[in-house]
C-alpha cells in the first residue's frame, strides 16, 4: 500500500520530463553532432513548456553517445526562452563534483529563471565522471555522504563552516549568489538503496525514485521508509517522485516499434559495465505491460500506468525519462507534444 490520500494531498501533482541528451539521429539513421544534439535538447525544453509540462530535467553524462556534461548551461538556455516550467538536473553526479560549484551553478540558474531551479543529486549509476575528474570508485560512498552533507549546509544560506576529508574545509565562508527566496528544491535520486532513502530524509531532501526495471510497486516500502525517517529526524513532510523511462506515440504498436530497437542497442551496450541483462522481446513486453517499469505506448496507456504507479507508491511527482540513442528529434518532439497535450491532462483526470 502507498501513502494515504491525506498524506499525498499535501503536495501538488507534478508531471515532468527528463532527458539524458542522448545523441539524436537523422532520418537516414546517421548520428547528429554533439552540438546539434545539445541545440535539439534546448528546443525540446522550450516545447515542453508550450504543451504544459511542469518540469524539465537534464541528466549529467560524459560519453560520446550522451554528450551532456554541463546540464546547467543547457537549462539556462531553456530558462531564457521560457517563463513557467521548472528546470533542474536529473541527476547531478555530486560525488565527482564540488558541492560549492553545484550550489553556485543552480543558484545562478535559479536567478536567471526567476526561481524555477531544482537539483536532483545522485551518486552516479553512470560512473564515467570518476576517472575524468580523478576520483577513486573505492571512495564512492564516502564522497557522496560528505558532499551531500556540505550541500545541505550550503542550502541553508548564510556563511558556511564545514570540515571534511574530500575537499578543503570552509570557515565562515560566504557563498554567492544568494538566493532571493530561500533554498531551491533539492532531491536525492535513489535507485535501490535504503541507506540513500534515510540519507535524503536526514538532510531534508525530497526523494526521487529512479525505477528503470521490474515492478515499480516493489519500491512502495521506500516511500514508507522515507516518511518514517522524516518523522524520526524531525523533518517536515516532503514529496516523493518517480523517474522512469518511456516513449509516447500515437498507438501502443508504434511506440513499441520506435523504442524497442534503440532500447535493445543501448542496454546491450551498457550491460557489460552495468551488469544489466540484455533484454529480449519477452522481457520488453513485460516491462511495457502494466507491471513493468517502461512507460511505452499510446497516451492512454502511458497515462493509466503513471496514475497507477503514483498511487501504489504514494508519490505526487512523475518524470518520464524520454529519448533513447537512435531516435530522431522529430520522434522526441512528438513524444513531448503527446505527453503534454494528452498524457498530463489524463493523469490529472485519473487522480482527481
Image (spheres, rainbow, N blue to C red):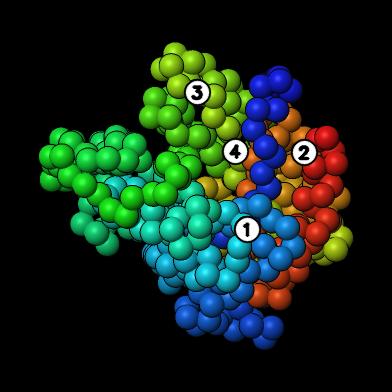
Report the residue that reaches farthest toward the front: 180
Q: Earlier in the sequence, mark 2 or mark 3?
A: 3
The part of the image, by quadrant, that contains residue 171 is top left
Q: Residue at x 69, y 56 (%)?
A: 53
Q: Earlier in the sequence, mark 4 or mark 3?
A: 3
Q: Nearer the viewer, residue 69 or 350?
A: 350
Give the answer, above or below, for where 66 lies relative to 98. below
The secondary element bearing badge 1 is classed as: loop
The part of the image, by quadrant, that contains residue 219 is top right
Q: Earlier in the sequence, mark 2 or mark 4?
A: 4
Q: Position of residue 287 (x, y in %)?
A: 71, 45
The secondary element bearing badge 2 is classed as: helix
Q: Is residue 321 visible?
A: no
Q: What's the mark number on residue 236?
A: 3
- CA distance for labels 4 and 3: 16 Å
Q: Which residue is mark 1?
A: 84
- CA distance for labels 2 and 4: 12 Å
Q: What's the mark number on residue 241?
A: 4
Q: Position of residue 316 (x, y in %)?
A: 66, 35
Give the answer, above or below, for where 179 lies relative to 70. above
Query: Mark 1 and mark 4 in contact (Cβ < 8 Å)?
Result: no
Q: Which residue is mark 2?
A: 307
* Quadrant including the N terminus: top right
Q: Is residue 352 left or right of residue 190?
A: right
Q: Earlier in the sequence, mark 3 or mark 1?
A: 1
The secondary element bearing badge 3 is classed as: loop
Q: Nearer the viewer, residue 118 or 83?
A: 83
- CA distance for labels 1 and 2: 24 Å
For the residue carrying disc 1, how many other residues have a C-alpha within 10 Å: few (<14), some (14-19), or many (20+)?
A: some
Q: Nearer the viewer, mark 4 or mark 1?
A: 1
Q: Nearer the viewer, mark 4 or mark 3?
A: 3
Amino acid at each position: 500500500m502507498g501513502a494515504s490520500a491525506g498524506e499525498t494531498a499535501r503536495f501538488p501533482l507534478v508531471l515532468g520530463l527528463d532527458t539524458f541528451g542522448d545523441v539524436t539521429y537523422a532520418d537516414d539513421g546517421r548520428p547528429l553532432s554533439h552540438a546539434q544534439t545539445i541545440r535539439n535538447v534546448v528546443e525540446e525544453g522550450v516545447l515542453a513548456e508550450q504543451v504544459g509540462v511542469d518540469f524539465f530535467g537534464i541528466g549529467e553524462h560524459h560519453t560520446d553517445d550522451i554528450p551532456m556534461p554541463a546540464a546547467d548551461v543547457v537549462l539556462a538556455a531553456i530558462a531564457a526562452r521560457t517563463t513557467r516550467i521548472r528546470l533542474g538536473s536529473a541527476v547531478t553526479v555530486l560525488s565527482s563534483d564540488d558541492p560549492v560549484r553545484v550550489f553556485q551553478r543552480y543558484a545562478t540558474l535559479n536567478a536567471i529563471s526567476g526561481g524555477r531551479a531544482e537539483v536532483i543529486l545522485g551518486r552516479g549509476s553512470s560512473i564515467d565522471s570518476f576517472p575524468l575528474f580523478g576520483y577513486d570508485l573505492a571512495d564512492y560512498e564516502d564522497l557522496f555522504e560528505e558532499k551531500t552533507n556540505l550541500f545541505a549546509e550550503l542550502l541553508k544560506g548564510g556563511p558556511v563552516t564545514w570540515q571534511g576529508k574530500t575537499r578543503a574545509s570552509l570557515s565562515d565562508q560566504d557563498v554567492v549568489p544568494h538566493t532571493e527566496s530561500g533554498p531551491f528544491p533539492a532531491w536525492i535520486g535513489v535507485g535501490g538503496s535504503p541507506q540513500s532513502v534515510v540519507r535524503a530524509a536526514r538532510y531534508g531532501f525530497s526523494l526521487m525514485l529512479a525505477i528503470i526495471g521490474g515492478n515499480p510497486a516493489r519500491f512502495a516500502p521506500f516511500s514508507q521508509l522515507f516518511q518514517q525517517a522524516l518523522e524520526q529526524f524531525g523533518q517536515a513532510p516532503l514529496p516523493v517522485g518517480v523517474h522512469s523511462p518511456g516513449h509516447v506515440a500515437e498507438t501502443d504498436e508504434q511506440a513499441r516499434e520506435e523504442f524497442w530497437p534503440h532500447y535493445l542497442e543501448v542496454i546491450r551496450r551498457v550491460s557489460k559495465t552495468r551488469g544489466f541483462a540484455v533484454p529480449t522481446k519477452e522481457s520488453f513486453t513485460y516491462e511495457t505491460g502494466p507491471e513493468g517499469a517502461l512507460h511505452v505506448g499510446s497516451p492512454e496507456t502511458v497515462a493509466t500506468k503513471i496514475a497507477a504507479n503514483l498511487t501504489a507508491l504514494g508519490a505526487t511527482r512523475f518524470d518520464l525519462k524520454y529519448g533513447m540513442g537512435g531516435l530522431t528529434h522529430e520522434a522526441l518532439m512528438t513524444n513531448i507534444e503527446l505527453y503534454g497535450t494528452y498524457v498530463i491532462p489524463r493523469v490529472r483526470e485519473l487522480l482527481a
